[in-house]
Image (cartoon, rainbow, N blue to C red):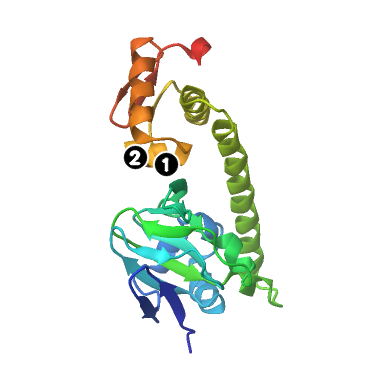
Amino acid sequence: MLPVYYIISSSSVVMTTQECQTMENSAYLALPLFAGLAAGDIPAALAALDALCRPFAKGETLLEAGQRGAPMGVVLAGRVLIEHLDLWGNRTLLGRAAEGELFAETYAFLPDQPMLVSVVAAERGEALFLDPAKLMAPGCEPWRWQMMQNLLHILAGKNLNLARRSLYTAPKTIRERVTAYFSTLAVQKGSLEFELPFDRQQLADHLGVDRSALSSTLSAMQRDGLLTIDRRRVCLKKAEGL
């Protein structure tokens, strides 16, 4: 029998027991967490990890700050945002998870710790919820060891991203934060032209700055010839100036 996860939303508590039947076994192999597994191993892995699927609508809260014992999520379709809302209503966008990416994995391994962030759907999609602690259960199945390696690799990458974020949230001025963030994206993409993963409000939240002040700073940087920006498309003009 599948367990029940309670997905807490700001308006209600939603109970789901939907089994994961929306994807072919082979489709899971495209997800980083399942990379290297055989298609025939997928049913056993999903069952062992108490896998449940849940569709979500844009703006819906999948997991809420304060919740304990949250499962680990994998985005099957769509995107989710990782947000922190303080007591005064100030929102900080800490990250996002797109198709194939994980969220709430740290809290899934620390069930006694309340979540400090909320997971909110940026668009319509579907998520897979798992209990990663079950990977540590006794067993010598090849898929178990492969998934543990995959998870370790993913966690290392997310830790690196967290370290990168500190590089562009440490500066005091908005221009310095924008400069550091855009420089990081340019290095990651290997190009002075790249697409921002956030809209303007989300970018402001991610950098921890006011949206209007951010827009003014971006306009000033364009006038100074440092970059051009068209909605989410950015082209850095002078690498030496950033």
Q: Residue at x 48, y 30 (%)?
A: 185
- Toward the front, the furthest residue is 88
Q: In this figure, which residue is indicated by the disc labeled 1? A: 205
Residue 77 lies left or right of residue 139; in this view the side is left
Q: Position of residue 101 (x, y in %)?
A: 47, 54
Of 81 and 90, nearer the camera is 90
Q: Position of residue 203 (x, y in %)?
A: 40, 37
Q: Secondary structure at mark 2?
A: helix
Q: In this figure, which residue is indicated by the disc labeled 2? A: 201
Residue 6 lies left or right of residue 34; in this view the side is left
Residue 164 visible from this viewpoint? yes
Q: Where 140 falls versus 115 (above or below)?
A: below
Q: Residue at x 30, y 54 (%)?
A: 123
- Toward the bottom, the furthest residue is 1
Going by the numbered disc 1, the residue's amino acid type is Asp
Q: Where 7 falls versus 102 (above or below)?
A: below
Task: Mark 2 and mark 1 in contact? Answer it, CB < 8 Å.
Answer: yes
Q: Please rate how many residues cluster around mark 2, counting C-alpha atoms within 10 Å: few if below 14, some from 14 to 19, many from 20.
A: some
Going by the numbered disc 2, the residue's amino acid type is Gln
Q: Residue at x 43, y 59 (%)?
A: 119
**Disc count in the image?**
2
Spatial distance from mark 2 to mark 1, Cα to Cα?
6 Å
Residue 170 lies left or right of residue 52; in this view the side is right
